[in-house]
Structure formats: C-alpha cells, structure tokens
Image: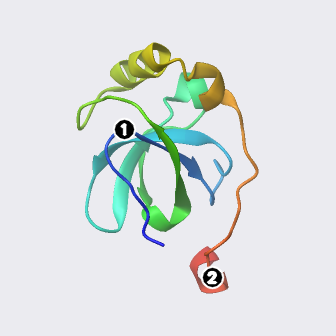
Amino acid sequence: MVKVIDIGRVVVKVLGREAGRKAVVVDIVDENYVVITGPKPITGVKRRRVNINHIEPTDKKIDIKRGASDDEVAKAIEAAGLVEYMRERVKPSFVGITKAETK
C-alpha cells in the first residue's frame, strides 16, 4: 500500500514519544522524510522532521501552504473544525511495520 503523504495531510505518529498523537505535514524533505507539526499547543507534537515510516496518514487534510508556520497551521485547523479531532489521541497500529523498522 502506498502512503499518500502531501502538504496539509493529517497524520498519526506511530513510533516515538509522541506515538498516538496527530500532526500535520508542513513540508516534504525527500522520499523518506517530512516535516510535521501539531502544533504543540493543540496536540503536543513539536515541529520536527520525521521518517515517513513513523507516521500513518489519515483521510483528513487541511489547506495550508508548504512551510506554513505553527500559527498558520493552528488557524487552518480551527477553520476546518478539526481542533477536537486533532486533540484526540489514538492507539497506534503497527500494521505493515516490520520488527526491523521499529528498532
């Protein structure tokens, strides 16, 4: 299955200390890495570069430009009415992730 990861896509972190929290893709670094942000006041996820194997895309997407600031992302989340959705934590599923990828 090919992951659809594009600017503005809401994703769930499946690995790391922020596992189960939602974030928004704000930039695509290369075929392996993207930059995400919560932003931190809403979801607790700091802006950072992550491996695409550590995130799972959702069906939600917000309208932001590439490299949008945390304030712009927060306003877009509010405009889309997704604040409560973003605050909900989910239990990450490890479907499709091999044991070698989790190390």
- Snapshot colouring: rainbow
* Picture quadrant where residue 92 is located: bottom right
Q: Residue furthest bottom?
A: 100
Q: Position of residue 20 (x, y in %)?
A: 68, 48
Q: Which quarter shows the C terminus?
A: bottom right
| 57 to the left or right of 2 | right
Say what secondary structure mark 2 lies in.
loop
Look at 63% across and 28% down and name the residue there. 85
Look at 31% across and 26% down and name the residue there. 69
C-alpha separation, residue under disc 2 versus residue under disc 1: 27 Å
In the image, is residue 95 above or below residue 86?
A: below
Can you tell which mark lies on residue 98? 2
Between marks 2 and 1 in the image, the one whose residue lies nearer the viewer:
1
Disc 1 crowd rating (10 Å Cα; few below 14, some 14-19, many 20+) is: many
Disc 2 crowd rating (10 Å Cα; few below 14, some 14-19, many 20+) is: few
Q: Position of residue 31 (x, y in %)?
A: 29, 68
Q: Position of residue 95 (x, y in %)?
A: 67, 71
Q: Amino acid at mark 2?
A: Thr
Look at 53% across and 57% down and name the residue there. 55
| 8 to the left or right of 103 | left
Q: Amino acid at mark 1?
A: Gly
* Picture quadrant where residue 102 is located: bottom right
Can you tell which mark lies on residue 8? 1
